């Protein structure tokens, strides 16, 4: 497991006092609380959360160390993370995306089709992007297509249909 868990991506600055807009990768937005340490960017620079609010599935975060729009614009496109030891407990059939990346992916007959390379947020559901280096499949993360996620053995079994292949 990685030392950090990605919770979202900074998409823009908001206002003139350093507030950042974050597209969340989690449905559990209640976990953003004042005083919490958040990390931005590939170098995981630490910031303290002063306040947060949610509007139309976008997080608006005020970080203690960012006080101007210019400073907020400097972190645009950065990933927002927490230390993995701070992440919430999962319910049954819930997974952290970064824990699944790299899993082998098999079809209905347990024939390997590739590895999970990315998970993309879709309008209705997430989409697994699976590749064997030549072919890419876009598989909606719904029960009809994702048959099993086995974290212990690190594999995913899927049902493929025409049109999933790029």
Image: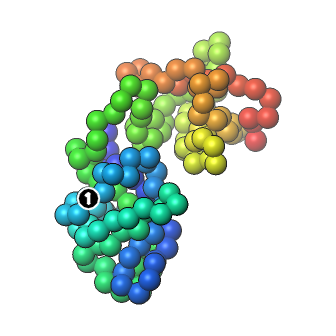
Colouring style: rainbow
Specify whether residue 58 is in view.
Answer: yes
Residue depicted at 30% across the width and 51% down the height: 31
Q: Residue at x 68, y 36 (%)?
A: 137
Label 1 crowd (10 A; few <14 / some 14-19 / many >=20): some
Element type at marker 1? Answer: loop
Lateral position of residue 12 relative to residue 159, left or right: left
* Residue 46 in sight from this viewpoint: no
Q: In the picture provided, is 69 more to the left or to the right than 164?
A: left
Residue at left 38%, top 64%? 53
Q: Is residue 98 above or below residue 80?
A: above
Left or right: 136 in relation to 70:
right
Outermost top residue: 109
- Which residue has dot 1 on it? 33
Image quadrant where one finds the C terminus: top right
Q: Report the quarter where the N terminus lies.
A: top left
Position in image of residue 84 (x %, y %)? 27, 46
Q: State the image coordinates of residue 30 (x, y, percent, origin top left).
A: 33, 51
User: Measured from the top left, where is residue 20 in percent x and y?
Assistant: 41, 73
**Residue 48, above or below 126:** below
Decide if residue 7 is on the left or right side of residue 101: left
* Number of numbered discs: 1
Q: Residue furthest left?
A: 35
Q: Is residue 46 above or below residue 116?
A: below
Percent x, y of residue 110: 60, 15
Q: Nearer the viewer, residue 43 or 26?
A: 26
Q: Residue at x 34, y 33 (%)?
A: 90
């Amino acid at each position: 497991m990685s030392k950090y868990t990605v919770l979202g991506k900074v998409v823009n600055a908001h206002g003139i006092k350093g507030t950042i807009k974050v597209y969340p990768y989690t449905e559990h937005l209640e976990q953003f609380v004042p005083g919490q340490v958040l990390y931005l960017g590939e170098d995981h620079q630490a910031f303290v959360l002063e306040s947060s609010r949610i509007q139309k599935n976008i997080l608006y975060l005020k970080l203690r160390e960012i006080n101007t729009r210019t400073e907020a614009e400097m972190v645009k496109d950065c990933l927002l993370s927490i230390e993995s030891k701070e992440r919430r407990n999962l319910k049954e059939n819930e997974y952290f995306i970064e824990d699944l990346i790299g899993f082998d992916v098999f079809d209905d007959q347990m024939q390997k089709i590739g590895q999970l390379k990315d998970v993309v947020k879709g309008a209705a559901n997430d989409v697994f992007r699976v590749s064997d280096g030549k072919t890419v499949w876009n598989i909606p993360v719904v029960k009809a297509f994702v048959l099993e996620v086995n974290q212990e053995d690190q594999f995913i079994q899927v049902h493929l249909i025409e049109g999933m292949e790029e």
